Image (tube, grey):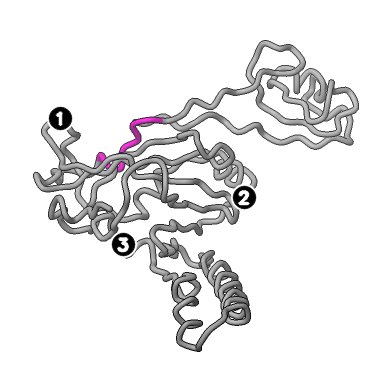
Amino acid sequence: AASCSALGGGGTSSSTSLVQRVSEDEVILTVGIYHPEKPATVMQEVLVLGSQKLTDLKDKISCQRETIAKMHGVEAPSGFFFINGTFYDDLREEGSIRYSENILQFIEHKQEQGKEAVLTLARGSPKQQEERLERSGLNHKFTQRRMEDVTFDELEVKLGSGFPSYVYCHQGCCEHRIAFHDLRLAHKDDRALVSEYPRVVYQKFERRCKCMICGCDEGRHIVYDDKHALCSPCIMCEGCHQSLHLSEEGEKLYDGYRMYTYPMGVPKEA
């Protein structure tokens, strides 16, 4: 385990000016965010300062499911990191949901069931039963904290992409494995201003599907149940969509299909 504060002082975690420089004893962490459906694939890699809050990293994570939610007006601002038995919930916005509440209730229910099973099957004196229960880990208590109140300096983490698995969850059910790939002091070759962090240093290129009709242009729309489409769902470029669905005056030619905007690519780092 590596404690972020063990390497450097880090400084305070308040709103910083655009010209505040990174201190010489600042800690820089390299955090990997993995694909929600391909847990071995790194989707994004971000440099974050030890003095920055967990919410600074959350706001830098890019996921297409969030893009889709924004496009359809169903974006949920809530989310959490799960690190070393603690749920760090994002409760900055009014109406945010503490996702970890239901998870903790489920865990506590399962722990009680496990305790009953251990005590029922365990043999020996009451003291031996209690010792066996303690070894089972069913007495472990998980905790909750507000993400916006915690800096990376306060965490104790293990480096590497293997065990343990830390988790980032957002939009209700989209879960990403996260890992701390590196932890070091800042040096002269790093970006000098605090405002330049968190900084994305790797972003996986998401290959876009081409139009299934012309086979040339990039897809812009996903169409379901279209009687004239090749398949359902069918990805269409803007030109093929207009030729198939709209008249020269821009009026809809027929109904009976559902069409959604195909998510755009990853955001570019300034």
Corner quadrant of residue 201 = top left
Q: Residue at x 53, y 29 (%)?
A: 265
Q: CA–CA distance between discs 2 and 1?
A: 42 Å
Q: Secondary structure at mark 3?
A: loop
Corner quadrant of residue 250 = top right
- In the rendered structure, which segment of residues is drawn in magenta? 196-202
Task: Of the two numbered discs 3 and 1 on the same chain, state the one appearing first in sequence.
Answer: 3
Residue underneath mark 1 = 189
What x and y, as percent, mark residue 21?
13, 43
Whether 201 is drawn above or below 39: the answer is: above
Residue underneath mark 2 = 73
What x and y, as percent, mark residue 145?
39, 68
Q: Residue at x 46, y 58 (%)?
A: 80
Q: Residue at x 77, y 26 (%)?
A: 234
Q: Which mark is residue 150?
A: 3
Considering every residue shown, the one lying at the far front of the view is 124
What x and y, as percent, mark residue 95?
52, 67
Identified by mark 3, the residue type is: Val
Identified by mark 1, the residue type is: Asp
Considering every residue shown, the one lying at the far left of the view is 24
Q: Residues within 10 Å of mark 2 (few under 14, many from 20)?
A: few
Q: Nearer the viewer, mark 2 or mark 1?
A: 1
